[in-house]
Structures are given as structure tokens and as C-alpha cells.
Amino acid sequence: MDQRAVAGQGSYPRRQRLNLAVLLLIALLMAGCASHGGWNQSVTPGNWVSVKRGDTLGELANQAGVPLKRLQRFNPGVQARSLAIGQRLLIPTHQERAPYGGPYRYQVRPGDTYTAIARHFGTRASRLSAGNPGTSASSLRVGQLIKVPLNGGSASSSVASRSSGSSSSSSTRRPALSGPLPSSAGSWPWPLEKHRVAREYGKDSRGTLQPMLLTSASSDKALAVADGEVRFAGSMRQLGRVVIVHHADNLQSVYALCQSLSVDVGERVSRGDAVCRTSSGDRGNELLFDMRRGGKPIDPRRVLR
């Protein structure tokens, strides 16, 4: 038999294996690029999306295929220059509308309630009930289109004031961020039992704002400081595993440096429920704890007892 033919038959499998290895490497690189910032695979119309490090409203709008202005109007109160990691944004569908002369037309999503919808759009559940006669809160169906009347008049004035960058929008938002905290503030429990404050909330020697750092020698469970909904549960660069819980009155609690997570995104938690297990450090079990209002950090001591 021709030795060249034998050699050719012997080398074919090696070339095939090499090609397969190259294809696998390309696939891994593509997967790495897709998961490393800059591209959020869940950005499709109808979904909620959690903001990741490096995301901008413009990029998210491009990925979803919706105009930036439309994305802003369906997320009233969201500021393009101060997106918070873990913050959830609503991606509108083609059937939804935010008309200038009337209320929103909103498409019901899984898990929606009048209360949750009203909270997102800054209105009251009672206004949704009144605006949708014949549709009770208990009979909402996924995919159903409902009206979302806004407080204080038509959608044009309310939405424009919240999504534009004008001075009037700033004055509209400020009361929500700088106004009084809920009546329960000052009585919320600490997230770690028998804790010690290893670092207070505030600026360091370089003027960088630092979150509060807690330690505990007896407990490794971080507990929810109030009832709410888990909006983020995953890993973040330099912060380890992180849980972000959204509460009433536009408040958010952040639990970072976790070793493992005890909750999933979308899960409802009650005060005192475990949200994660803390990491073990030189000073005991450590937890990075942060409180935010409207995505902006506030001193946790303003709400904790």
C-alpha cells in the first residue's frame, strides 16, 4: 500500500481533533465574552433585567432594540448617570405604550400584582384598580394589557418630569430621595446577630465612600432587615457573592462578601429570613452591608435600631 496513503489516513484523525479543539476554544471565548460585562443576555422585550457592572441605559436600549427614551419612560425615576449594580429595569414590549395624553398600557408579567406594578411606576394600587374596572387584583393574567394611571395628572407630565434631565425633573425626584424615611426606620434589626461594626459607613482618608463592614464571632447567617423582594443574587467582582433586596419606600439593602447564597432572584423574604452565609475572615464572620434609597447610598444607622 502507498505509504503516503497510510500516512494520510493516520493524520486525518489528528487534524479532526485539532479542528474540534479550535472550535471548542472559540466557543469558550465567545461564552466568556458574553458573560463578561458589556452584554446582558436577558435584555429582551418583556423581561426584567438586572444592571451589571459596565451597563449603560444606551447599551441596554440597543440590546433590547427599543429607543432609549422609551426605555427611560418605562422606568420612571431611573437616572442614566447613576445606575446601581443589581438595579432592575423593565424592558417594554411592542404592545405596551406610554402615551403623552393618557395612562400607560402595561402588559402583565409573571408574578405581577397591582401593588408591585404601582410601586414601579410611582403610583398607588388603588388607582390601578379604579383604572381597570372588571379586572380585580386576583384575576390578573400573564400577557393581559392593563392601564396604569399615574399620580398627579396625565402620563405626559409625570413621565416627562421623571425621565428627562431638566431641572424640573431633579426637583420632582428630590423629595422621594431626601424626604422622611418610613415610620419603621430606626427599628429595623441588624443583619448579623451579636455583631461588631468593624468599619462605619462613610468616606475613607481618600474621600471614597465606603459601606459598613460588620463582623460576628457567633453567627454566619446574614438576615434580611425588612420584608422585601430579592432583585439580585449572584457574584460581583471584588464583592464576592451579593444579595440585593428591594423594600417599600424605594429602599434597598445590600449584603456582600457572602460565602454562599440562601435566596434566589424574585423570591419574597420577610424580616429575619436568612439571605446568605457570611465569609470567614481574620476578625470572624464578615459582612459588607449597605443601605440605599432610590439607588443612592444612605447611612444604615438611619434605619437600623
Image (cartoon, rainbow, N blue to C red):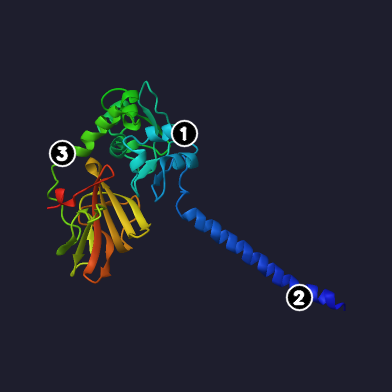
- With respect to residue 44, does 204 lie above or below? below
Which quadrant is the N terminus positioned in? bottom right
Three-letter amino acid code at the position of disc 3 = Pro
Alpha carbon of mark 3 to alpha carbon of mark 2: how far? 78 Å
Mark 3 / mark 2, whichever is N-terminal: 2
Three-letter amino acid code at the position of disc 2 = Gly
Dot 1: element: loop
Q: Residue at x 55, y 59 (%)?
A: 29
Q: Residue at x 25, y 59 (%)?
A: 288
* Residue reaching furthest to the right: 1
Alpha carbon of mark 1 to alpha carbon of mark 2: how far? 57 Å
Q: Which residue is mark 3?
A: 180
Q: Nearer the viewer, residue 90 or 68?
A: 68
Q: Nearer the viewer, residue 237 or 243?
A: 237
Residue 164 placed where, x, y %? 35, 30
Alpha carbon of mark 1 to alpha carbon of mark 3: how far? 35 Å
Three-letter amino acid code at the position of disc 1 = Pro
227 horizontally vs 63: left or right: left
Residue 111 placed where, x, y %? 35, 44
Q: Which residue is mark 2?
A: 10
Q: Which residue is mark 1?
A: 67
184 horizontally vs 6: left or right: left
